[in-house]
Image (cartoon, rainbow, N blue to C red):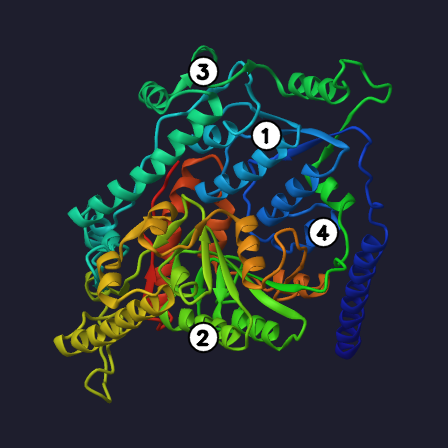
Amino acid sequence: MRRFIIHSFAFIGVSVMTLVLLGIVLAISHRAPKPSVPDLAVLKLDLSQHFDDVAKNDPIAHLRGETAAGFIDLLTVMTTATGDARVKGLIANVDGVSMSLGQIQEFRDALARFRAAGKFAYAYGESMGSNKDIYLASGFDQISVQPMGGLGLTGLVAERLFLRGTLDKLGIEPEVERRRDYKTFGDGFLFTGYTSSEREMILSYVGSLSAQMVDGIAKGRGMSPDDVRALIDRGPFTTEEALKSRLIDHIAFFDEVREEALTKASTDSNGAISKSRAKVISGSRYAQATEHGPKSSAVKIAFVPASGAIVSGDGGPNFGGDDMIAAASLSKAINHAIDDKDVMAILLRVNSPGGSASASETIRHALMKARKAGKPVVVSMSGVGASGGYWIAMGADAIVAEPATITGSIGVFALKPNFEKLAADWGANYDRILFGANAGIYSTGKPFTPAERERLGAQIDEVYNLFKSGVADGRNMTVEAVEKIAQGRVWTGAQAKDLGLVDQLGGLDVAQSVLREKLKLAADATFDLVLFPAPLTFFESLSKNLGGHDQAFALVDLFRGRDSQLASFAQMAEPYLQALRLSLAREPLVFTTAPVDFN
């Protein structure tokens, strides 16, 4: 009887799995046919989504026929639509933008090319509650907000969560070593407010970002920078106030903006209305309709995305999730590009605040191998390319960044939480038996001894010196010159360009132009950008997604991008979680940028 029951359950389990797999196959085979682009089309974009540089491979969304939001895909849509005579214009939801300032600048550049091709661009929002919303919207022909909306133009704020008071209450003592004074990430654990060094740094680079935003809004709205600064000091605005101040053009609902866009797309240059009415097509459907296979170009470029915190390993369940750069996996992809005889060069897309020093060096080593193999490496930095993110870029043939890209942070810190007092307060006690004078150096149950701190300091000094010498070699500078702009200090891309840390300002289009120069190709030469590592298959992605993630980061993912206080707290807490995660995983030498919210 027992055997019968076991066999019955086994049969049921196999049957259920078979039905699930059959359902998946049927879902795939019965997906909607490839959409077509109307003869007169208006592109509709939702810019309020969270955009990873490269779209996450979500098999469940794939089954539902949904397309994940990838920033590179968005740029591709804009480039394709710019040269597509069927597309007359676009309307975009610009409400709750979560792009980085660097991404906004890159999209604005693509939007400027779209408009220069004679196409219109309308921005709409139920409200535009953040500086990012308005900065992005100011790149459009016209801006409309519904009557009950408003504008949150208030200027940038550099806001940081300091945990020292909380740690003291909990009985947790932070143990931090850093090189140098501007390497302030650990200050969130050590102090209750900004130090003079961090305040000086923030005034400099946030001041640069603020000037860029003011200039962008002023040019987009036909104002002077002084006019915009005066408006910022008066903000936020009601919708009527925004209209009178010329920050927006219309007070309207989306259906009214949509109707205006369709009418404009249906009207020719002589004012005649076309017999065939223009139609709206979403960005995702347009991407599907215009998707092509590999180009016929003989020039193949490896496109390698590096987005997230840098960690050791190959991307298993503990490390290398969607917001992690797993060094072993990325290095393997680079090595595959080196071995591929058809690959002429590597385009590395960096969007990383840093992470493990050793993991960053593993990635840099692979890129240096590519250069030695005669394959140029050009780096395009997106929202942030700092600390470990800059480490992996510093040896490239050329570095391209947006003016707002957070850059540099050439420094090192080590972090260890000490839970000894917390344990004692709750009646617990650490005891240990050491087989080596410094065997307990990474123990979270005690502070560093003088000997341990000396050994840790020696390691940090070595890494910091290697960082500086790597920058000096890669950027053709002296170590002494690097020291003056290093010390853990963060710069904007515009500042970094003046300091010699970046070669050119711009996005992927500029990086590709640099590649053409390196390969001695014509300025209008085409090439194939091939993703390395290759995208996961449907079933590989399904298996990965079923594998789960660390619960703390799952909560951050849940709240990220949502309009709530929880989203703001999750955004501020995430870097601390990453630092603690690295520390507890025995990755003591890390470098990452301080968390700052620019909304």
- Name the side, left or right, on which 509 lies relative to 291: left
Q: Alpha-carbon distance for marks 1 and 4?
A: 23 Å
Residue 242 bears which disc, if any? Answer: 3
Q: 50 or 400: nearer the eye?
A: 400
Q: Alpha-carbon distance for marks 3 and 1?
A: 18 Å
Q: Alpha-carbon distance for marks 2 and 4?
A: 36 Å
Look at 53% across and 36% down and name the residue there: 108
N-terminal-most mark, 1 or 2: 1
The three-letter code of the residue at mark 2 reads: His
Residue 172: quadrant of the picture: bottom left
- The secondary element bearing badge 4 is classed as helix
Residue 535: quadrant of the picture: bottom right
Relative vertical location of residue 382 with respect to residue 223 in this rendering, above or below: below
How many other residues sit within 10 Å of disc 1, few (<14), some (14-19) or many (≥20)? many
How many other residues sit within 10 Å of disc 2, few (<14), some (14-19) or many (≥20)? some
Pointer 4: what residue?
62
The three-letter code of the residue at mark 1 reads: Asn
N-terminal-most mark, 1 or 4: 4
* Residue at the bottom extreme of this rendering: 435
The three-letter code of the residue at mark 4 reads: His
Pointer 2: what residue?
365
Relative vertical location of residue 140 with respect to residue 424 in this rendering, above or below: above
N-terminal-most mark, 3 or 1: 1
Pointer 1: what residue?
93
- Name the side, left or right, on which 339 lies relative to 306: right
How many other residues sit within 10 Å of disc 3, few (<14), some (14-19) or many (≥20)? many
Residue depth check, mark 1 versus mark 4: number of the one nearer the observer? 1
Look at 15% across and 79% down and name the residue there: 451
Asked if the residue under mark 3 is in contact with the one under mark 4, i.e. CB atoms within 8 Å, the reply is no
Asked if the residue under mark 2 is in contact with the one under mark 1, i.e. CB atoms within 8 Å, the reply is no
Residue depth check, mark 1 versus mark 2: number of the one nearer the observer? 2
Q: Alpha-carbon distance for marks 2 and 3?
A: 52 Å
